[in-house]
Amino acid sequence: MMKRVSNKIGILGVFLMAFMLVGQGQIAKKASPIFENGEAQVVEAFSDPSTWIRHDLWVETTFDSDGDGKLDRMHVDVTRPEQTDSENLKLPVIYESSPYYAGTAGMDKGIFWDVKHELGESGEPRKHPNVTRIGERPIISNSQVRTWVPRGYIVVHSSSPGTGLSDGAPTVGGNNESLAPKAVIDWLNGRAKGYTERDGDKEVKAYWSTGKVGMTGTSYNGTIPLAAATTGVDGLEAIIPIAPNTSYYHYYRSNGLVRSPGGYLGEDIDVLYDFIHSGDESKRARNNKVIRDTEMKNGQDRVTGDYNEFWAERDYLNEMKPMKAALLMSHGFNDWNVMPEHSYRIYKKAKEMGLPVQIYYHQNGHGGPPPISMMNRWFTRYLYGIENGVEEEPKAWIVRENDKKDNPTPYKDYPNPEAKDVQLFLTKGAPEKGQLATNKPKRQGTETLVDNYSFSGSSLAQAETTKHRLLYVTAPLTDDVHISGVPKIKIKLASNKPAANLSIWLVSLPWNDSFNTKITDNIITRGWADPQNHSSLTKSKPLVPNKFYEMEFELMPDDQIIPKGQQIGLMIFSSDKEFTLWPEPGTELTVDLDGTEFTLPVVGGKL
């Protein structure tokens, strides 16, 4: 009896004490995410970095890419609010993976391929640098954490295969680079094993994860979310790739032509391999022999530039069937490193598949995420399930030429549905300027240019007269012209040699070379091709000198308003000093003007 009374008094005392503490504000409400206007808000309880729990681990994959007889393990770090322990709070995950976290090789010119040689040759051997690995446990990277942890997300990073403290070999687009992030997502959902040490057997569970994962990142870090999504892994709900490389062929080749990414003349897939190979030093020699010096050497084909099985396996467009993640793409129309076609081709396919999609384009160069509000709404919708209406919003958001990047203009879709193809024809004028007009002129015959890589494309576009390019311009525009979509050229040409570069620039004239030039002022878009691939991307064939061939190809997608008073110029030349190989000057390209036309997608359909 006395015991029961004592219990009653004890319970009553607890309630009285709790009542008093609540009145004094000493019992805090459990922390939880907050949402306003369809976005996750910063929560004070999640915002103090000193309270965050940070730890690392290794996730076991399903592959052995370094050939040591053991399944590769990926190095993973975790940053999460302390309430995931103290209050058993489960939260969704923002995940970024990269081959760059542990350091990269230097940019010594010797690591790039020599480009000064004849077409059909591979050039002189290049240097193979070693990467000095950097970084300390348990933090792989600090990217994303200050943005997303205070908003109620856990942030996870991982080093991709053969980099940092992850096992394996870098394959630059091989299957292991898709399966590695898949394994991490499987671990976050309890389907794969994580361990406290690289070679240990003590397991780590992701008990704090809801299993809902979103991925993002820029450039190579933006490629990996797409790679993971193509596996169809359950739990990957949404991805936001920023300037992603979606096909290594499209990154290092263009319509059969060996073409470098902008800013890295002479780079190729084996150069990138060397640049990121920061993994276990004891495994590097084997990886180099198997991956770089065998698979890449035999597959990359710097001689013909043809599309083959090696490149097809590194084209994520070919792998999209299992994909189910909601996709928000981001890219710059003036990104001449990872060019804007990379995002557009994936966006277009995902839309055809019926996936939730949006695309954000800005007018600048490489990189550039969507506005934080746009990213927030995307992740809030698909990781928290908050019905914020993103599915009903316009699919395309484009930053206009003079606007800030956080103020994009919405459009129903990209390309603009109101854009119509305008056919443009060429009137002779070499070595000065010919005309580019909507009316097909009477027979014009041919015009010839002489290749010389020593002249840059910008100098050729500004020249009043030169034999090294052909330039055809519209009359001065009487109204602003809104280009939206993918320009195309159909060209009939002959070369006096069995091989030649072919470069096409669309420019806005007169050229602005003043100190306040904007990135949108001069170059509208560009394209490159190998005439040897006029009939097949997979089989080039030497040209019969002076025989005419027809070929069609696309330039990079664009959405740009050319102001009235300007002239739109189509420039045809051969070697592009910033992008192509540099053969001995003197190759002559002859263009049949009557067999050549240019298609420009214009909103309203009028020039």
Image (spheres, rainbow, N blue to C red):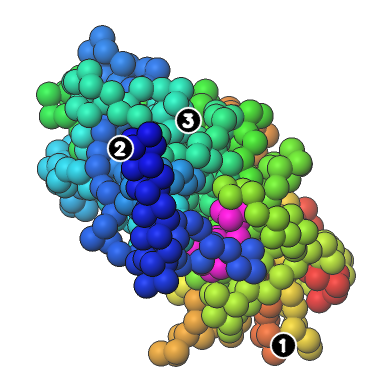
- N-term-proximal mark, 3 vs 2: 2
State the residue at coordinates (74%, 84%): 480
Q: Position of residue 324 (x, y in %)?
A: 65, 36
In which quarter of the view is residue 535 placed?
top right
State the residue at coordinates (37%, 49%): 9
Residue 500 shows in the view = no
Q: Position of residue 306 (x, y in %)?
A: 52, 32
Q: Position of residue 52 (x, y in %)?
A: 29, 54
Judge by depth and name the residue closer to the eye, 15 or 145. Answer: 15
Judge by depth and name the residue closer to the eye, 210 or 513. Answer: 210
Furthest residue to the front?
Answer: 1
- 396, above or below 205, in the image: below
Judge by depth and name the residue closer to the eye, 93 or 429. Answer: 93
User: Residue 76, labelled with which disc?
Assistant: 2
Q: Is residue 135 left or right of residue 576?
A: left
Q: Which residue does the numbered mark 1 point to in the structure image?
A: 564
Q: Could you tell me which secondary element the residue under label 3 belongs to?
A: loop
Q: Which of pointers 3 and 2 indicates the residue nearer the eye?
A: 3
Residue type, mark 3 in image: Asn
Magenta residues?
Answer: 368-381
Give yes or no for contact between labels 3 and 2 (Cβ–Cβ under 8 Å). no
Q: Could you tell me which secondary element the residue under label 2 belongs to?
A: strand
Quarter holding the N terminus is top left
User: Residue 189, labelled with which disc?
Assistant: 3
Q: Could you tell me which secondary element the residue under label 1 belongs to?
A: loop
Residue type, mark 1 in image: Lys
User: Residue 70, labelled with which disc?
Assistant: none
- N-term-proximal mark, 2 vs 1: 2
- 150, above or below 582, in the image: below
- All told, the count of numbered labels is 3
Q: Is residue 123 left or right of residue 559?
A: left
